[in-house]
Image: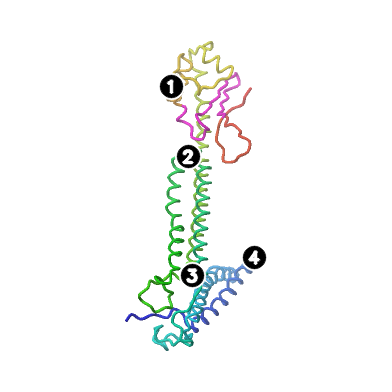
Amino acid sequence: MIRKKIKYDRRNIKILLVTTIVSALLFLTGVICMLAEVEEDVVIALSVLLGLYVGGGLFLFAGLNLLSGFCYIRRLKAYGYEIPYKKEDYGDDLRNVPRVSGKSCPEIKNVGRRVLVFFYAAVFLLANVWNVRYIIRWYQFDGGLAVFLLCIMLLFDSFWGISALLFYRQENMQRYRDDVDIDDSRKERTPVEKGIVSGMILLCIMMLFKMLLIQFEEYGFRSRAENDQRYLQTISSCVGTAMMADGIDRTSDSYMQMREGCYISDWGRPDDAFSREIAENLGISDYSELNGKFFTSDGNPRIYVKISDEGVYVRMDNPLRLDRGIQFSYEEGNLR
């Protein structure tokens, strides 16, 4: 017969309680030393490091184990076991621990199990609401990448829904048992405290991942926006170079259009020397190719160009913006 180990005894609980209190005081000391407006020295620095990292880490570890211990002891009492002071007194085997009330199958309400189901189901629902908001906001900026990242999030977020379903199934007393029940014919259900602690840790990881994802998207968008701004500078430079080229006909149709101001994104293949000179400088054979040079326009880019004796003015009228305020254009140069 397989030994049924005792997870916690009264001695464990006392040790964990003292450790939790001491580590909490150590952590509090570190926080006070960090916030206190005193001259820093080696002692203060060591107090901060020990308090925040050693005290904080130990407090988290001991506190979580203390919570698990209290819940385990509660289940032992519910099943009528005498609470052991030392595991070794009973050979670290729950089968050897006497029952003070003689109960073998107590009527335990599955309130904790229902809390687990509600918690995981609620996180699953909220995570997918966030996913919907994410794709609505970011699809317009980079549809392919947004869909790819959404699929990854949906895959990982499905964990919450599957876990909620599994916890719901574990309410079945005929198929599942608690960890203090010695009936080996049924499967052992996940302890409530373990489900809650694991869920809180995974929730923090999920929230961190989603925040990092938004920062990644914002960084990528700003990089593409900077690329578009630089390409407007390139257009301005290429137009200026074409204006100074020898033999340019300043009465040509394209030149006169630029003097008045025009959208070169509406042009097609260049049909005179001036427009061909600009296209060659830009490395394109057709002005429709400008559509592939910009990444943050709302639809095809609307590129406005106006030339004067003072210089070249270039503007993209329809840029996408991360903020939802006034949609200022991207521009290069001064409009005279």
- Give the magenta part as a residue range: 290-317
Report the Cα–Cα distance between label 2 and label 1. 25 Å
Give, as a three-letter code, the residue at label 2. Answer: Asp
Q: Secondary structure at mark 1?
A: loop
Instruction: State the quadrant of the C terminus.
Output: top right
The residue depicted at 62 percent of the width and 24 percent of the height is: 335
The answer to which of 254 and 186 lies nearer the viewer is: 186
- The disc, 1 or 4, on the residue closer to the chain's N-terminal end is 4
Q: Are marks 4 and 2 in contact (CB under 8 Å)?
A: no
Crowd around label 2: few <14 · some 14–19 · many ≥20 (10 Å) = some
Up the image or down, 106 lies above or below 220; here it is below
Q: Secondary structure at mark 4?
A: helix
Q: Position of residue 263 (x, y in %)?
A: 54, 22
Viewer-side label of 4, 2: 2
Viewer-side label of 3, 1: 3
Q: Position of residue 186 (x, y in %)?
A: 37, 73
- The disc, 2 or 1, on the residue closer to the chain's N-terminal end is 2
The answer to which of 80 and 93 lies nearer the viewer is: 80
86 sits left or right of 22 in the view: left
Viewer-side label of 1, 4: 1
Give, as a three-letter code, the residue at label 1. Answer: Asp
Residue 310 counted in the magenta span: yes
Which residue position holds label 1? 286
Q: Secondary structure at mark 2?
A: loop
Which residue position holds label 2? 142
Q: Specify the label residue 192 is tagged with.
A: 3
144 sits left or right of 27 in the view: left
Which residue position holds label 4? 35
